[in-house]
Image (cartoon, helix red, strand yellow):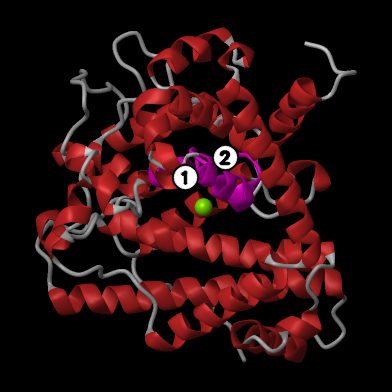
Amino acid sequence: MTEKPEAHIGNANNMNSLAPYAANPEQTLGRQFQEPASETRNAFQRDRDRIIHSTAFRRLEYKTQVFVNHEGDLFRTRLTHSLEVAQLARGIARTLNLHEDLTEAIALAHDLGHTPFGHAGQDALNECMRDFGGFEHNLQSLRVVEKLEQRYAEFDGLNLTFEVREGILKHCAIKNAKLLGVVGQRFLDKTSPSLEAQLTNYADEIAYNNHDIDDGLRSGLITIEQLSKVELFANNLAIVKEKYPKLEQKRLIPETVRRMINTLVVDLCTYSAQNITQHQPNNIADIRQLPQLIGFSKEIADQNQKLKQFLRKNLYHHYKVNRMSAKAARIVRELFKGFFENTGLLPDEFQAYAETDKARAVADYIAGMTDRFAIREHRKLFTVEEYL
Ligand code: MG
């Protein structure tokens, strides 16, 4: 099979053309608090910059998804994951003439609300918060940018545009949507978010499925033999093996993974472009009323689904990952119980907050922790030999 390095779908060479139905920073639905415009940046660029300078963004470096942070330096963290999502999202946005800066801002912010220890941590915290409104990482990302970051004189949060906040909130339970005002409205109305928000969601999925394969193989928890039964992997592995029959495994894996990513991205761009052409939206208001137009073709959606099933069964529920998850959940549960039963153990600012809403203050404190900070806090709270 020959590759065509110079052939582009869409708009790879032209950074300046924007489709009429793209989000436009000059027509943003605005910020919660009015501010003068930046002299040098459009509203979405400014949002992206605010996200990069936030405390929560820096913490992503020490938060993990599948592998706990101290397990090795080679695995993805939430920071490198978010950068990969931003990279994919920008590429897709440019191909489809959508607003790159908006997708980048959404991508960099989408995981800000994650607890330490990935999904194990979030499930444990949600369980602890069952009687107090629950805990959703997606909602928490919004809470970080609307409330928890405290670095501006005139408002809490980062005061981001509606379009970025809409993109961060990719799913939301109806009972929570009712509490969120304008940004939750689309879950009640069953309307669609911007195409930029839709595609960033797919970029997230493409990024984590593929980097989990890469991390999973390198950690030895899954094998090439197992993955050879998964069509999307097998097809691309066959292409690499045919072209480079003697390639060593170290190169074989990334050569295969990058082709998988390419298969998914090309399909997403091609199929979404067809969808857009078919529905003929004139502006972003039309986009909001139409069904979601970004998506995979049926064939690739099926292949992608099988890949996710494979990862769930063989990687996310590998007994070694289960052991890590069980330990992580125990740490989160014990931290919650310890702080909830004695708010005098919380740092001063959270003690004051706990006086108005004890459970939420404890949840916010724990959710903000990195993996290693949570482990250290747990040790400080429960180990006699550990002081301070
Ligand atoms: Mg993500």
Q: Residue drawn at (37%, 61%), measured in percent from left and top?
A: 199
Amino acid type of the residue that numbered disc 1 sits on in the rendered structure: His
For residue 265, side relative to residue 212 (left or right): left
Asked whether 6 or 75 is in front, the reply is: 75
Residue 23 in the image: state x and y as whole percent. 22, 49
Q: Which residues are magenta?
A: 105-128
Q: Which mark is residue 137?
A: 1
Asked whether 280 or 372 is in front, the reply is: 372
For residue 211, side relative to residue 266 (left or right): right
Confirm whether the magenta stretch covers residue 114.
yes
Q: Is the Cβ of the residue at disc 2 closer than 8 Å to that at disc 1? A: yes
Q: Main secondary structure of the magenta part?
A: helix
Viewer can see residue 220 = yes
Distance from the alpha carbon under mark 2 to that under mark 1: 7 Å
Q: Secondary structure at mark 1?
A: helix
- Label 2 C-beta lies within 8 Å of the nearest ligand 1 atom: no
Q: Secondary structure at mark 2?
A: loop
Asked whether 332 or 340 is in front, the reply is: 340
Amino acid type of the residue that numbered disc 2 sits on in the rendered structure: Thr
**Quadrant into which the N terminus falls:** bottom right
Task: Name the residue carrying label 2.
Answer: 115
Q: Residue drawn at (86%, 19%), measured in percent from left and top?
A: 384
Q: Which mark is residue 228?
A: none
